[in-house]
Image (spheres, helix red, strand yellow):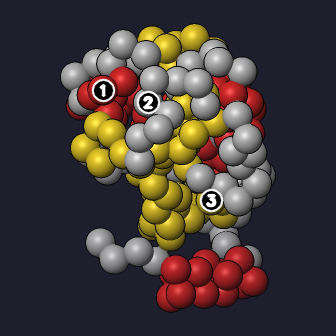
Amino acid sequence: QDTTGKILAQIHSGAIDVGFCSPRGSFPNLRYFAVAEDELYLIVPNNHRLSGLRETSLAALADEPFVLFKAETALRDVIEDLCRKAGFYPKVSFEGIDEKTVAGLVGANFGVALIPLSPDLDEEKISVIKIVNPICSRQIHLVWRARGYMPPVVRLFKNFIESTMKLPS
């Protein structure tokens, strides 16, 4: 478990054989395929003006302060790209490295955030709102080196994941 950049560097260097992460862009020495897609939801403090809504558009957040994931995370890139496509650049109030930290900062009234939902998300101080325009998501990929030795057990693991979890293209 680490940031996408560190996982990709470890795969490239041979420190690890495969990894699960969210690569953005093209990597000629790596191969990957999507195994999961996480929808991203808006979280706001319970006292926020949007807290009673079930859904909203991303553009409605243009003037909000954002708690974003740190710059070295692929999720930060995904969120910034989604915001740009919605016509704005998010105003950063704070940064966190993981969902729990980001949710805690939102619950402490430091801004709003887009996060994938997790079962251990503490919803006592935050409200979760679906983004409907556009639907916001990120893909998780299995990544490995294009060339070089792959141990047989790793090849079996990769083939198993590909045959059971690969998302349709």
Of the residues shown, which amino acid type is indicated by label 1?
Ala
Measure how far apart labels 3 and 1 are at the Cα level: 32 Å
Measure how far apart labels 2 and 3 are at the Cα level: 34 Å
Q: Residues within 10 Å of mark 1 (few under 14, many from 20)?
A: few
Residue 77, image quadrant: top left
Q: Position of residue 148 (x, y in %)?
A: 61, 65
Kindly check if marks 1 and 2 are in contact, taking CB atoms under 8 A apart as contact. Answer: yes
107 and 76: which is toward the camera: 107
- Which label is found at residue 50? 2
Of the residues shown, which amino acid type is indicated by label 2?
Leu
123 and 41: which is toward the camera: 123
96 and 118: which is toward the camera: 118
- Label 1 belongs to which residue? 60
Give the structural element (helix, strand or loop) at label 3.
strand
Q: Name which of mark 1 and mark 2 comes first in the sequence.
A: 2
Q: How many marks?
A: 3
Give the structural element (helix, strand or loop) at label 1.
helix
Give the structural element (helix, strand or loop) at label 2.
loop
Q: Nearer the viewer, mark 1 or mark 2?
A: 2
Q: Residue at x 67, y 73 (%)?
A: 150
Q: Position of residue 74 (x, y in %)?
A: 53, 38
Q: Position of residue 44 (x, y in %)?
A: 55, 31
Q: Position of residue 47 (x, y in %)?
A: 58, 24
Q: Residues within 10 Å of mark 2 (few under 14, many from 20)?
A: some
Measure how far apart labels 1 and 2 are at the Cα level: 10 Å
Q: Name which of mark 2 and mark 3 comes first in the sequence.
A: 3
Q: Name which of mark 3 and mark 1 comes first in the sequence.
A: 3
- Label 3 belongs to which residue? 20
Q: Residue at x 41, y 41 (%)?
A: 53
